[in-house]
Image (cartoon, coloured by chain):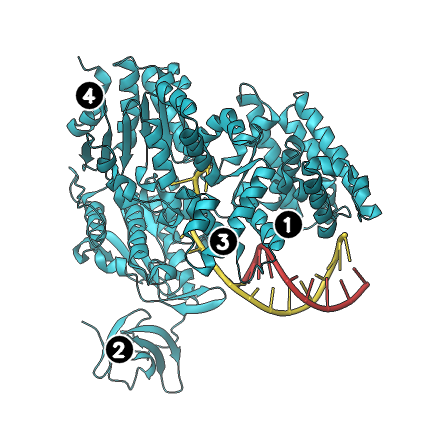
Chain colours: A cyan, B yellow, C red
Amino acid sequence: MPSTFLEDLNPVQREAVEHGDGPVLVVAGAGSGKTKVLTYRIAHLIRDRQISPFAIIAITFTNKAAGEMKQRVAQLVGPVANSMWVSTFHSACVRIMRREAPRLGFNSSFSIYDSADSERLIKLCLKELNLDPKRWPPRGIQATISDAKNKLMSAGLFADFASNPWEQRVADVYREYERRLEEASAFDFDDLIMRCVEVFDRFPEALAYYQERFSHVLIDEFQDTNHAQARWATLLAGKWHNIFVVGDVDQGIYAFRGATIKNILDFERDWPDARVITLEQNYRSTKTILDAANAVIENNVMRKPKSLWTASVGGEPITRYHAQNEHDEAAWIAEEVAKLRDDGMRLSDTAVFYRTNAQSRVLEEIFAKTEIPYKVVGGVRFYERKEVKDILAWLRGATNPMDSVAIQRAAQAPRRGIGDTSLGRLVAFARENGIGLGDAFARAEEVPGLPKRATGGVLEVVRIFDRIRTAGEDGFPVADIVQLAWDASGYMNELQAERTFESLSRQENLRELAGVAGEYDSNAQDASLTGFLEQIALITDTDTVEGEEAGVTFMTLHNAKGLEYDAVFIVGMEEGVFPHIRSLTDPEQLEEERRLCYVGITRARQRLYLLNAWTRSLWGQVGHNPPSRFLAEVPGELIDEAEKERSLDRSGFKLGSKSVPDQFKVGQEVEHPRWGRGVILELARSSIGLEATIHFPAVGDKRLDLTLAPLKPAP
DNA sequence: CATTACCTGATTTTT
DNA sequence: TCAGGTAATG
């Protein structure tokens, strides 16, 4: 009865794939083949159980993961796979809301505001409410509102529950913010989910339609869903109860954005007849790496005990390197990567992970110097670059005359005599007359108090919008419309006149944008300007990671989730860096950092390197941090300490004379009869010999002369 | 209204 | 360090 393709599954995986109707929770450890289970499950539904692909919806966390999954299913069952929905929560909701938004009074050509747009809008609200942005930081307010939306709390509900002055103020802003979003017929990212749930809740016939259609709901990375998303899924699967979720509480690293591993822990409560299947066999890493990962994660209290195992044995020991500073750290990696390459490892199979994006700079410098190819994932995102957002604002403003954020942005890029005051007048005029900002622009001459210069500028903006809109309606290729936008607005001219290094790269980015549009033109079945804008609104840089290029990959630990490499370097393993300083006081956040560490470790197939630096320049200041607690959690017998045998001078630190007691090095642990154990932070020559700065946990930092002080290396 | 010179304050971020 | 925001000037 079972079909042949199921034979490359192990018994547990197979059980999950072949499970009949009803809710299933697959608890899948790192590297246990969870994507495989998900894809095979879908293939099995289609091939062996004759479920129509049309009735299947699969949710992943990135567009890239969605694309890959669709492709893998297509390999198993052929092109019929294309008629099923494989997308992110957000894309699925956009698709639904394009139909349903009018029920909530939104235009079906609504705009989607990314976090930068929504922050801008919040600033406008603060101004309106006469709140000082210094006392009420827009980012913080945005975070609070986002949090509320992730918990499905509307502005009204939030106000009712506001229990302190901060929340009460936020409630005011929240209300105003919602008003303006509605006015602009726009959704922010969180709205896409929350408003969709609202439709489901308020319009049973709408819910019934989607429930009926999707007889099978599958969700990946369930540990990173927030309450709103879990509720959305629960509603959707409410008729057939065929909800199949895959997740790993140990890999939940987005609690700071409202994700809650509670969704996994509560799954069995929400679906009492749920079948729970645990995948614990790891097919990715060596035993050594797995032992390290298990040992680290065991220090978390808030988890279900689970232990990954592997059929493979041994493996190279984990390499530990104590760098003197971040330059030494990067240089050591460069040397090691070169060695690995000489031993036959492809650069594209190696990666360096760090906690914060700022840490990539030193790596980039050193790798550029040593001419080892590399690529950086993340950082300043393409679609968040100023010039890209400016041109997109032109496109958005042209297609949605209600989109006041986009229109205002376009009107001031480039500058054409329209200042903040004039914009304020236009916005007020629009509101008084109950029209969109686009229409207010068209009637600029009627707006009281608008200077001549501004009026002229505004009318020019209107003409440019018209040209873009017409081009869109006439079905011109989107790539051409992008060019039209930067030509007609004078944006490109301005950039070309600037002639700086910076402006050159901005021009390049715009051409890249036209390139993306061109790709869209040739790939999308029914390409349109609005279709392009929609697709772009939900895309991120991580969606375009290509593993095939010949280079070492640099990225944050967050971005590393879901990926794997033969050799992995984790840098900056220092208290305050990783775990991050902001997490040190909160046990829950600390556990999240530890999960991040677990994710990092389990990305490695063959080799794992853990590094820390004794001193690190951050924000223009040198700081020194003790080694990360996570290092101590890795069992010593798995670790091989790398020697600092290589030239010390790459760190800028030189030991000149032989008279120096060379048993002492920066980073070394020493013992003092009075102050106990300490660590050497710095060595410098003094008048008599060598002076050391040593950090003793008991008493703090001390300066001692090595030739005199009663110091000996710690045992 | 736009430009320029300080000043500040700073995670991670699938969407 | 550096980017982004504010305050004073042209």
Distance between the Cα atoms at labels 3 and 2? 44 Å
Q: Residue furthest front?
A: A160
Q: Which mark is residue A698?
A: 2
Q: Which mark is first along the chain, 4 or 2?
A: 4
Viewer-nearest of discs 1 and 2: 2
Distance between the Cα atoms at labels 1 and 3? 38 Å
Residue A16 spot, x, y in % from top left: 21, 27
> What is the secondary structure assignment of the residue under circle 2?
loop
Q: Report if residue A571 is visible in the image.
A: yes
Q: Is residue C1 shown above or below A315? A: below
Q: Chain of mark 4?
A: A
Viewer-nearest of discs 2 and 4: 2
Q: Is residue A640 left or right of residue A144?
A: left
Residue A250 spot, x, y in % from top left: 26, 45
Residue A550 spot, x, y in % from top left: 43, 38
Q: Mark 3: few, some, or many residues within 10 Å (few <14, many ≥20)?
A: many
